[in-house]
Image (cartoon, grey):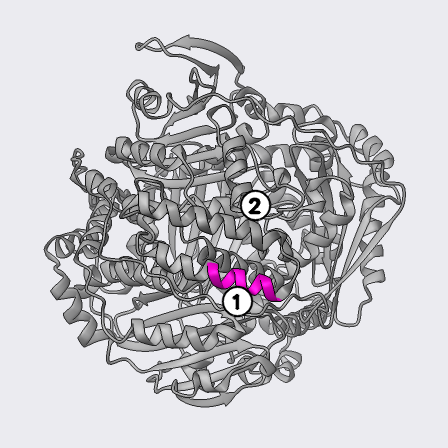
Amino acid sequence: MQTKLVLKTKNFTDKNGYTYQQVEGDETGVRIYKLNNGLTVYLAQNDDAPRIQTYIPVRTGSNNDPSDNTGLAHYLEHMMFKGTSRLGTLDWEKEKVLLDQISDLYEQHKSEQNPEKKKEIYRKIDEISQEASQYAIANEYDKVISSLGATGTNAHTWLDETVYKNNIPNNELEKWLKIEKERFSGLVLRLFHTELESVYEEFNRAQDNDVRLVNYALMEALFPKHPNGQQTTLGKSEHLKNPSMKAIHQYFNDFYVPNNMAMVLVGDLDFEETILLVDEYFGKFEYKELPKKEKIIEEPQTEIVERIVKSPSAPRLNIAWRTDSYGTKEEHLAEMVAQILSNSGEAGLLDLNINQKHKALRSYAYELGFKQYGLFSLMIVPKENQSLEEAEQLLLAEIEKVKNGDFPDWLIPAIINDMKLQKIRNLETADGLATALYGIYINDRTWEEELSEIEKFEKITKQEVVDFAQKFFQKNYVIVKKLRGENENLIRVENPGITPVKINRKAQSEFLTEILRQKSSEITPKFIDYKSIIEETQIGDKKISFVKNKYNHIAQLHLIYKIGTDHDKELFLAVQVLQYLGTSRFSADQLSQEFFKLGISNDFKTYDDQMIISLTGFEENLIKGFELLKHWITEVKPDNEVYESTIELILESRNVAKKDKSRIMTALSHYAKFGENSRFRDVISEEKLRAIKIENLTEKVKNLTQLPYEIFFYGKDFDGFKEKIQPLLEKATLTIPKPKIYQELETQGKVFFTNYDMVQMEMSKIGRASQLNTKNYGKINVFNEYFGRGLSSIVFQELRESKSLAYSAYVNYSTATYLDRHNYVVSYIGTQANKLHLAVEAMADLMQDLPQIPTQFNNAKNSALKQIASTRITRTNIFFNFLNLKKIGIDYDIREKIYHEIESLQLEDLTQFYNQEIKPISYNVAIMGKKENLDHSAIENLGDFQELSLEEIFGY
C-alpha cells in the first residue's frame, strides 16, 4: 500500500542566499527558483548517470504568429540553430551588411504582387545569399554543442510553446550555459533562404501525413476564431514563400525575454552550484514587458460541423468536442471519460465493445488540454465495407453508455491506480521529470498543482462523470471524415532555383575555438560487470535472472522464449488470436478487466528470433498477474467465430497497410534488401489462414508453458519472488523448431520503384556490408557521428544546409544483431520530386570519398568518447543489453573496448575503414513517389530499374 503524501509549497533560502520553492512531500525534490529578471529555473536531482537533461521552454508558439506571417514561430525555432554575431561567422561586420540587404529584399519580395518581379527579387536574394555564405559557418551551433558530448539536440514548436532540448554530460554544464547564453543573446538570420526551403520540405512531409491532414481540419472547425485552429505550426504555404526577416526579429525581441522563459535542469547536479552558474550566465538578460494579447473567446458550438479530407490511405473518422483549458474541472472530467472509453489496460468501453469484438479495425479516445480551451476526441478506422456513418454510430453508442452510467463501479478506482503507476514511471527518469516541469511552465501552473492532480481525479465520482457526460456530449461536435481519394488541396511548388551556398566546413569561429580550449573536469567512464549485477538462480529447468529495482515499487516480469516468427509463424498468429479469447472462467473482456483491476499490464512481443511475454505493475500484485496469465494461457478456449472475425481483421489490416505511406516504404526497403525472400512478404496466405483450425492455435498457446523459456524479474524482493513463483512453474517438455533462414542477398545496383500519390519522393539506398566484426564498433560509432547522422554531420550540412534538398537526410552504418549476419549501410533522403536529380547527384558525390575535415573529425571523436563516458546502463536495460550482447557471442560490456578503440582512432584510420568497408559497397535503391513526377534521367545511373506493385512488395 502506497503512503499518501501531504503536498504543500514552502519557501526556502539556499546557502548562497537564493530563495526557492519546494513542495513538501514531493519525492522528486524539485527546486523552483526565480531570478531577478523573471527567468524561472527548475532544478531536480537524478543520479542515474552523470548527465543533465536540459530544456529551455519559451512561452510562445504558433498562436502568437502574426496572421500575415503564420509559421513564423516555427521558422524562428529553426533559425535559433544558425548561430549569432560571434557563433557561426568568420567576419560578422561584413556578413551583417549583406544580411541587412537580404532582409530589405525580402520585404520588397513580400509586398511585390507581380510574379515576374518577385522572381527577379528572389534571384537577387539568392545572389547576395551566395556572397553572404562565404562568411557563414554552417551548423556551428551543432558542432559546438556536440563537442560537449550532447545528445538529443533538437527543438519543437506548438500552439503556446517553443522548447529547446539538449542532454549533456554534467561536467559540461558551464560550457553549455555559456553557449546557450550566446545563442539567446541575439538572433542572426544567416543562411535564411536555404533553411526556408528545408522548412518547406517539412511542410511537404506534413502534406503527405494523414494524421496532420485530419488534425488540421479538426482544429480549424473546432476553433473557428481562435489561433488554436486558425493557425498551424508550419504555417500557410503563401506565408512560407513570402517571409519577413524583420517580423521574425520583432517576434524574437517580443517573446524571447527572460520573464517569458524558463530553464529546466534535471540530472546529476548540485543545486547551489547550478543556480549560481545559471544566474551568472542568464541573470543579466533584461526583463521586458510582454505584448498585450487579446483573449479570443469562441462562441458555443451549437451544431454538428462536418469536414471531409482525402488522401490515398485508408478511411478514418474523428469526432471532437471543444473542452475547457488544461487543469480545469471540465478538462479533468473529459480526461476521465477518455480513460473510461480507452485506457492502457485495454479495459475501456471502446477497447472491449469495438476493438475486442472486431467491430472496427481500431478505435480510441483521447483528451488534450491547451493553455486556452482543449478538446475531447474519438477516432475510428472502419473495416473495409463499413461506412463512416456506421463507424460514427459505433462511437456515439459508447458515449451513450457513459451518459447512462453503463460501466462498472470498479473502473474509476482502477483508472486512478493506473494513473498513479504511470505518474511514477514518468517521473522516475530525468527526461520524464524534465518534460513534466517544462509542461507546467508553459501552462502557467504550479508544481504543487501538478503533483496534486491525481488527488483531484480521486474525488471524481461515477455520478459526476454521468452528469458531466449528459451535459457535455450533445450534437455540437466536429466530425472529420478522411476518405480515400486524391487530395485535391496538395500544394506542389516550383523549385525556386536556389544556388547551393558555401558552408565553410573547415573553418571555425573564435567563439567555438574558445569553447574547445576551455577545460572541463573529466568524467570517468563506468562499465558494467553484468555478472555481478545480474543475480541468477535456477528453479527446475528455468533460469531466473534478477536486477534490483532501487527506485520504486513497480516491478516487471518477463518470460523470454528463444522462438520467433522465423521458427513458427502460426505461433505469432496464435498469440494474436489469444487477445480476443477467453478461458473456462473469464471471457476475453473479463480478462482485460481483471488485469486492469490488479494494475498489471500484459504485453506479448514477437520478434524474428524470440518472443517476450511481459507483466508490469506494482510488485505486490505481480504474482497474481502471473497466475492470471498462466490461467489465460493454459485454459484458453477455442472460439471459431472469434477466429473467423480475427482473420477478417488481419486481412483488412493488410489492405490498410497497402495504402499507408510508411508501411509501403518499409515493405519496399525490405524487398530491396531481401528480394522475393523478404520476411515482409512471407506471411500466412489468406487460403492457409482460413484452413487453420482454431483448436490448433489454442494448442500452440497452451504449449507455451511446455516450451523452454527463461525468466527475468525486476523488482525489490527476489527471495519472496522465488518462493511464490516456484510452485507455478512447469518443466519444459517440448523443443524449439529450427528457424527458417532468410538469405541476406548481395546488393547489386538495382532500383525498385513503387507508385504512391504524394508530394515528395522518398529514396533509400541499401548496401550489404561485411559480416559483423566487433573490432570495428569504434570506427562505426565515429563514422555515423562524423559523416552520416545528426545535425552536425557532413550529410546534414551538405544536403540540407548547403543545398536545401531535404528536411530529413542521413547515412547510417548499422551493425548486425547476430555473428553470422551482415552489417548494412543505409542512406535516406526525402525531397520534392523536382529536386530528386539534385539529391541523387549530391548523395553520390558525398559518398565518393570520405571528406577530410580534421577539426570536425576530432569533434565527432570527442563527442563519441564523452557520450560513452557519461552514459550509464540502469534498470531493466542492464539485463536486456546483456541479452543482446550474448547474441553476438559477448558476455561483457563491450563499450570499454569501443572507448579505447576510439581514443586511439585517427582520421587516417577512419578513411582506411571507409575505403575498405564502405566505398566498395554496391547499393540497391528503394524509391517511392508519384509515378508521373519521377525523373527517370535522375536515377538512370543508380542501376537497373524495376517498378514493383504493392502485391509484389507485400506478398499478398
Residue 317: x and y, percent? Answer: 75, 58
Quadrant location of residue 656?
Answer: bottom right
Quadrant location of residue 16?
Answer: top left
Q: Is residue 754 left or right of residue 521?
A: right
Residue 734: x and y, percent? Answer: 42, 69
Q: Secondary structure at mark 1?
A: loop
Q: Residue at x 56, y 65 (%)?
A: 119
Identity, as a three-letter code, of the amino acid under mark 2: Leu
Q: Choose between 453 and 661: the one closer to the eye.
A: 661
Asked if disc 1 and disc 2 are in contact, CB closer than 8 Å, the reply is: no
Q: Which mark is residue 72?
A: 2
| Screen quadrant of the C terminus | bottom right
**Is residue 82 something that shows in the picture?**
no
Q: Earlier in the sequence, mark 1 or mark 2?
A: 2
Q: Which residue is mark 1?
A: 496
Q: Is residue 788 above or below residue 675?
A: above
Q: Choose between 662 and 249: the one closer to the eye.
A: 249
Q: Choose between 919 and 491: the one closer to the eye.
A: 491
Queried whether the magenta region covers residue 353, the answer comes back as no
